[in-house]
Image (cartoon, rainbow, N blue to C red):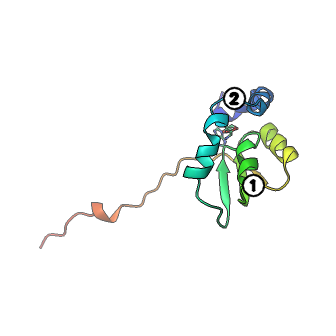
Amino acid sequence: MNKRDAWEGEAANWIDWARATGHDSYWQYGPVFFDDVVPPPGRRTLDVGCGEGRVTRDLVEKGHDVVGVDASPTLLAAASAADHRASYVMAEPQRSRSRTTPSTSRSPTTR
Ligand SMILES: C[S@@+](CC[C@H](N)C(=O)[O-])C[C@H]1O[C@@H](n2cnc3c(N)ncnc32)[C@H](O)[C@@H]1O
């Protein structure tokens, strides 16, 4: 089972968990995270792995124009139903396999 299917299979449980205040450290560290780590609102904020959307909703409250991305259709539907102010996109980001050679790794030329 891949990660997408695993999260989709647990979507209902995750929604209950994420929305039950105090169940995880988000409720404890969230305020510090938003005040000290997250940059101020800019042109667009991407919330990758947005789940049922609690982080997206909090970002919107702080003035961000947010796109929430997740691989689980059930979690995205829950996020969208809870708050229409953000945009939600179903996607599963892949690790990039860049073939670009960094300029610092060029071989020295010999004469
Ligand atoms: C632990 S939950 C966190 C949800 C949300 N960020 C929060 O704090 O409530 C992880 C989320 O990442 C999503 N996810 C995991 N791997 C992913 C991938 N490769 N592409 C897109 N979403 C992914 C899952 O579907 C799940 O909604």
Q: Residue furthest bottom?
A: 111
Residue type at mark 2?
Ala
* Element type at mark 1: helix
Work out whether residue 90 can be spotted.
no
Quarter of the rendered structure image containing ligand 1 = top right
Q: Residue furthest right?
A: 81
Which residue is more in the foreground, 68 or 29?
A: 29
Quarter of the image that includes the C terminus: bottom left
The part of the image, by quadrant, that contains residue 107 is bottom left
Q: Position of residue 29 (x, y in %)?
A: 60, 38
Left or right: residue 3 versus residue 103 is right
User: Circle 2: is it few (<14), some (14-19), or many (20+) Cα within 10 Å?
Assistant: few
Q: Which residue is mark 1?
A: 60
Quarter of the image that includes the N terminus: top right
Distance from label 2 to label 1 (Cα)? 28 Å
Residue 109 is marked as none
User: Circle 1: is it few (<14), some (14-19), or many (20+) Cα within 10 Å?
Assistant: some
Q: Is residue 6 above or below residue 39?
A: above
Left or right: residue 51 versus residue 110 is right
Which is closer to the viewer, label 2 or label 1?
1
Which residue is more in the foreground, 111 or 11?
A: 11
Q: Which residue is mark 2?
A: 6
* Element type at mark 2: helix
Q: Is mark 1 within 8 Å of ligand 1?
A: no
Q: Is residue 8 above or below residue 42?
A: above
Work out whether residue 94 can be spotted.
yes
